[in-house]
């Protein structure tokens, strides 16, 4: 797999062995077949002392893997707050983006590491930074159901109404994946329950389409229009029926959905 003795020593946090191997001539920049360096794997596994020592010995702090992820990315992704802080102190680029445009703040939010998220923002990370698809850290926190992180990001200034390139808001992302608690909290924080993406699809339609009954009920309770149609004329009831979500169909009818509404495309 291309891993060297220095690589495995760093991977397992053996600082003294790491130092000795470098003194004996080991290549501190040698990467495995995936482009991972000793510094990268030490950061990924949370070995702060090894990280510091490798940088002192000349390891390149900005070297990224084949997907563009830096040591700071993987430390943030895995929730290693002390390593994150140390890497930034040592000169790591807090705004570095990987191949899909995600920053260290994105990946910390993606995995629900609230303390790392807060620390990165304190250290200057851009809370509005968007990945290539337009997703912000708040989008990915909501999409993955990390309620506390979503709330914290809003408290720190994240735009709750931000839409990515397809027009989907954090509320839409949470509803799409069935994260009821996040949905409720975002609406409490004044997310627009009616906001639709570029095809006119609302959070309620997304929840109904994917069979998330509890989210459907909650969105209607919170004021969502049960008969709102997208650009094709498809309502939440239509897409729930189309995808075979019987319990959602019944619940929507109970909540006042129009059972006779027809889809524009399939009418023709």
Image (spheres, helix red, strand yellow):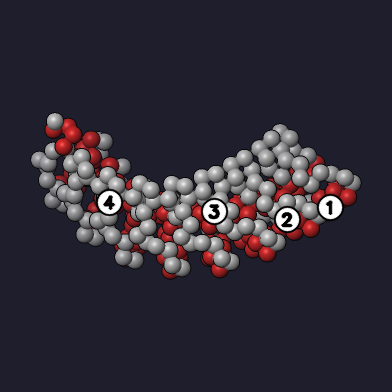
Q: Closer to the observer: label 1 or label 3?
A: 3
Q: Secondary structure at mark 2?
A: helix
Badge number at residue 3: none
- Residue under label 4: 196
**Which numbered disc flags the more N-terminal residue, 3 or 4?**
3
Q: CA distance from mark 4 to mark 2?
A: 45 Å
Q: Secondary structure at mark 1?
A: helix
Number of marks in picture: 4
Image location (x, y in percent) of residue 20: 87, 50
In the shown orientation, is residue 267 left or right of residue 21? left
In percent of the image, x 36 and y 54: which residue is there? 163
- Residue under label 3: 103
Q: Closer to the observer: label 1 or label 4?
A: 4
**Which numbered disc flags the more N-terminal residue, 2 or 3?**
2
Q: Secondary structure at mark 4?
A: loop
**Which numbered disc flags the more N-terminal residue, 4 or 2?**
2
Question: Toward the viewer: 248 or 160?
Answer: 160
In percent of the image, x 78 and y 39: which residue is there? 4
Q: State whether residue 148 appears in this view.
A: no
Q: CA distance from mark 1 to mark 4?
A: 56 Å
- Residue under label 1: 19
């Amino acid at each position: 797999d291309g891993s060297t003795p220095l690589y495995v020593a760093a991977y397992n946090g053996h600082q003294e062995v790491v130092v000795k191997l470098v003194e004996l001539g080991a290549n501190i920049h040698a990467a495995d077949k995936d482009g991972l360096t000793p510094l990268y794997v030490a950061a990924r596994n949370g070995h702060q002392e090894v990280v510091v020592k490798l940088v002192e010995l000349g390891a390149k702090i900005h070297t990224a893997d084949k997907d563009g992820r830096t040591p700071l990315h993987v430390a943030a992704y895995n929730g290693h707050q002390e390593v994150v802080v140390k890497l930034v102190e040592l000169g790591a680029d807090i705004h570095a983006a990987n191949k899909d445009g995600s920053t260290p703040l994105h990946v910390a939010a993606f995995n629900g590491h609230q303390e790392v998220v807060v620390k990165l923002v304190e250290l200057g990370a851009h809370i509005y930074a968007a990945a290539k698809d337009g997703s912000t850290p708040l989008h990915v926190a909501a999409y993955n159901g990390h309620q506390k992180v979503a709330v914290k990001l809003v408290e720190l200034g994240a735009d709750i109404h931000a839409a990515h390139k397809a027009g989907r808001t954090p509320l839409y992302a949470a509803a799409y994946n069935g994260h009821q608690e996040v949905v409720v909290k975002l609406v409490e924080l004044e997310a627009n329950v009616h906001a639709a993406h570029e095809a006119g699809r609302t959070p309620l339609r997304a929840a109904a389409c994917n069979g998330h009954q509890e989210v459907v009920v909650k969105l209607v309770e919170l004021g969502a229009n049960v008969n709102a149609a997208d650009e094709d004329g498809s309502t939440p009831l239509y897409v729930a029926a189309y995808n075979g979500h019987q319990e959602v169909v019944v619940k929507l009818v109970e909540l006042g959905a129009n059972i006779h509404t027809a889809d524009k495309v399939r009418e023709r």
